[in-house]
Amino acid sequence: MEKAIPFQYQFSSVECYFQSSLASLDELAGNAKVIILTDENLYRIYKEDIQAYPIITISPGEETKQQPTADQVISELLKIGANRDDLLVGFGGGVVTDLAGYVASIYKRGMRLGLIPTSLLAMVDAAIGGKNGVNHGLYKNMAGTINQPSFIIFNIDYLKSLPHEEWVNGFAEIIKHACIGDEAMFQLLEEHEIAYWKSHPDHLAALIERNARFKLEVTVADEKERGIRKWLNFGHTIGHSIENRYSLPHGKAISIGMMAAAKLSVALEGLDSQFPDRLKKLLLTYELPVHFAADHNSLIELMAADKKMTSKGIDFVLLKAPGNPTIRNISLKELTEFLKIYFQ
Ligand code: ADP
Ligand code: ZN
């Protein structure tokens, strides 16, 4: 099997594989029992590749990411007789990798975890950095832990079955990375569109590895989100409240959030006033929405309940320039003023 690329977090190393697949699981597991957690869509498509293992399936979709599902997975693990040194492998999109990470961190106070992201979004974002959890009602990720997997396998072959809409979602996070840390990638993205990446697998694999490494490096440097990891929330403060309120897909919601954050950056951080138009063009090229007729009052209400909101306000990620983010504390009052105008 290929040599792993290790990323060293505070208490553990995450071994990353960019050429492997499900076929490597036995070798990675050693003597441990492998248990696969996946969703029904993936089960249907990849049944033959996972049938040698006990499999726990969940219903696809964000609605499944709730505590009762975690409890069901725990019951299944008990039925299977899983031990702490057995290996739970999350094979799926972000919903599966988040649930796998969460359950693995609490089952018998922690069992081994491996992740095989199958959606573009999970490959460049959700499966990386150890954050996991479940939603509570409308509020995203209200219960969860930070628990690094022992390995992550990245394999673009799994994207062959990914619905087009999910490609669009994944590109929102890629564009986010370009905004906060990679001007050259921003330009590269401007030269192409989704169809190009689908038809050039080598370039796609390189793009995914570039994004995965970016998130790995940021989260290694700041695992607990005290500093630079906050950059990854670019577009997410407003994005999450739109996602919650209007049940928009995550990528679409943060696309709208990034546009709003870019506008706010022009006003507060002196970002070049041409940049929002450039970002808008790029988002539209990748089939993402750039505006939404949202009701600002309900967005404000939701943002006031954001877990990152304190009495002082909320740490907002803005851009000084493309690839140059900054964190600015914005009071709820200031934010309210902006949202009233932006989403009028
Ligand atoms: P995320 O966008 O965070 O990855 P999900 O886990 O909800 O979120 O995945 C999005 C949707 O894509 C789900 O319906 C999931 O079943 C489906 N999906 C994920 N990966 C694949 C794949 N490789 N092939 C087909 N469908 C997939
Ligand atoms: Zn996101």
Image: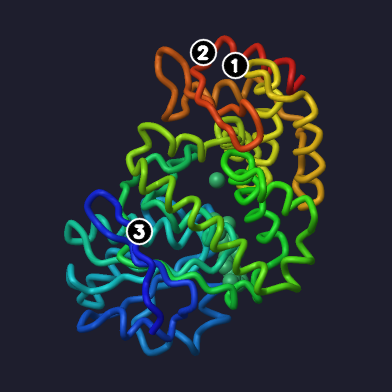
Label 3 vs 1, first from the N-terminus: 3
- Mark 3 neighbour class, 10 Å CA radius: few under 14, some 14 to 19, many 20 or more: some
* Mark identifier at residue 331: 2
- Mark 2 neighbour class, 10 Å CA radius: few under 14, some 14 to 19, many 20 or more: some
Residue at 20%, 76% in the rendered image: 81
Q: Is residue 193 above or below residue 274?
A: below
Report how far apart the C-alphas of labels 1 and 2 lie in the structure: 6 Å
- Residue 330 is situated, as x and y percent measured from the top left of the image, at 53, 16
Q: Secondary structure at mark 1?
A: helix
Q: Image check: 36 left or right of 61? A: left
Q: Which residue is mark 3?
A: 7
Task: Tell me which image quadrant ligand 1 sits in.
Answer: bottom right
Q: Given the image, on which type of amino acid does mark 2 rest? A: Ser
**Marks 1 and 2 close (CB-CB < 8 Å):** yes
Would you identify the image quadrant in which residue 178 lies? top right
Mark toward the viewer: 3 or 1: 3
Please say whether residue 124 is visible from this viewpoint.
yes
Give the camera-side residue of 146 and 63. Answer: 146
Q: Is residue 41 above or below residue 316?
A: below
Give the camera-side residue of 57 and 340. Answer: 340
Please say whether residue 72 is visible from this viewpoint.
no
Say how many tags the image has.
3
Quadrant location, the N terminus: bottom left
Q: Is residue 308 above or below residue 214?
A: above
Would you identify the image quadrant in which residue 223 lies? top left
Q: Given the image, on which type of amino acid does mark 1 rest? A: Leu
* Mark identifier at residue 335: 1
Give the camera-side residue of 65 and 173. Answer: 173
- Residue 190 is situated, as x and y percent measured from the top left of the image, at 78, 50
Q: Is residue 96 above or below residue 307?
A: below
Q: Image check: 103 left or right of 57? A: left
Q: Secondary structure at mark 2?
A: loop
